[in-house]
Image (cartoon, rainbow, N blue to C red):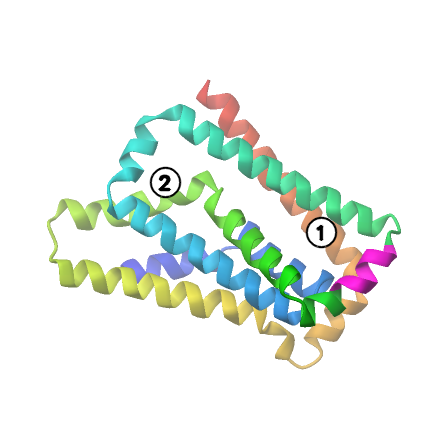
Amino acid sequence: MLCSVYFLAAATPGPSQLFILEQLVLRSKRDARWGALGVSLGTMIWVFFVIAGLGQLLSAWPEARRFTALLSIALLFFFVVRNLREILGDRSEAKSTPQTGASGSATKNSSFVQGLLVNLLNPNSVVFFMTLFAPLIATGISRLELGLSVAGVALISLLWYQLIAESWRLSGFYEFLQKHSLQLRLIVSLFYLYWAARLVLGLVESF
C-alpha cells in the first residue's frame, strides 16, 4: 500500500520529472540519467531523514522549513534564468553542452548534484514522507517490515526516474523533444515559475 501511494506521488508531474526531461532536451541522454540518479538519492535522504526522527524536528522548527523553501525557490529561478538565456539566443553554450555532457565528468557531476538539490530542497518532500511513514512507525511495525517499505520506495524511485531518463528510447520521442526544444523550454520554465509561486505562497502563509 505504501509503495503504491509513493508511486502515484512520484508519477505526479513536478520539479523532479521536469528537471530530468530538461536535461534530456538541453544537455544529453547521459546527463538525464545522472540527474535521475541525483533525484533518487534525494528521495532516499529524505526517507532516512524522516525515519531517523529528524523530520519531526524540522516540522517543529518553522525557520528551517522556510530556509529550505527559500533555497528551493532560488534553485527554481536559476533554472528559469538558464532556460531564458538559451531561448534568447545564447546558442554557443547550448551547442557545446551536449558534447561535454556525453564525455566529460564535470557536466555529469553537475547534473547529478542539481538533481539531488531539486529533490532535497523541496520542502514538500519531508511533509510527504512524514505523512507516508509516520502511521507505520506509530503502529510499531517490525524492522523487517519497515526495511521492506524503505527498499520498495528506493526501488520505485530508482526505476521510475530512470524510466523518465530513458524515455528517449520511445520511437520518435527524442527527435520530438529536440525538434520542439524551444517550446518545451518555455513550458518547463512556466512550470518552474508555478512551483516557485506555490512555495512563495506557502512561505507567506507561514508568517
Q: Is residue 1 something that shows in the picture?
A: no
The CA distance from mark 1 to mark 2 is: 27 Å
**Spot occupied by residue 62 in the image (x, y as percentages of width and height):** 39, 25
In the orientation shown, which residue stands out farthest toward the bottom? 171
Instruction: Identify the disc placed on residue 187.
Output: 1
Which residue occupies 30% across, 65% down? 152
Q: Is residue 154 left or right of residue 119?
A: left
Which residue occupies 26% across, 49% down? 133
Q: Dot 2, crowdedness within 10 Å: few (<14), some or many (≥20)? A: some
- On the image, which quarter does residue 145 sit in? bottom left
**Spot occupied by residue 88 in the image (x, y as percentages of width and height):** 87, 48
Q: Height in image: 191 above or below 108?
A: above
In the orientation shown, which residue stands out farthest toward the right? 89
| Dominant SS in magenta | helix
Q: Is residue 6 something that shows in the picture?
A: yes
**Spot occupied by residue 203 in the image (x, y as percentages of width and height):** 50, 26
Which of label 1 and label 2 is nearer to you?
2
Question: In the rendered image, which residue does mark 2 sit on?
Answer: 127
Which residue occupies 54% across, 48% down? 118
Labels 1 and 2 touching (C-beta < 8 A): no
The first of marks 1 and 2 along the sequence is: 2
- On the image, which quarter does residue 34 sit in? bottom right
Magenta-tinted stretch: 91-97
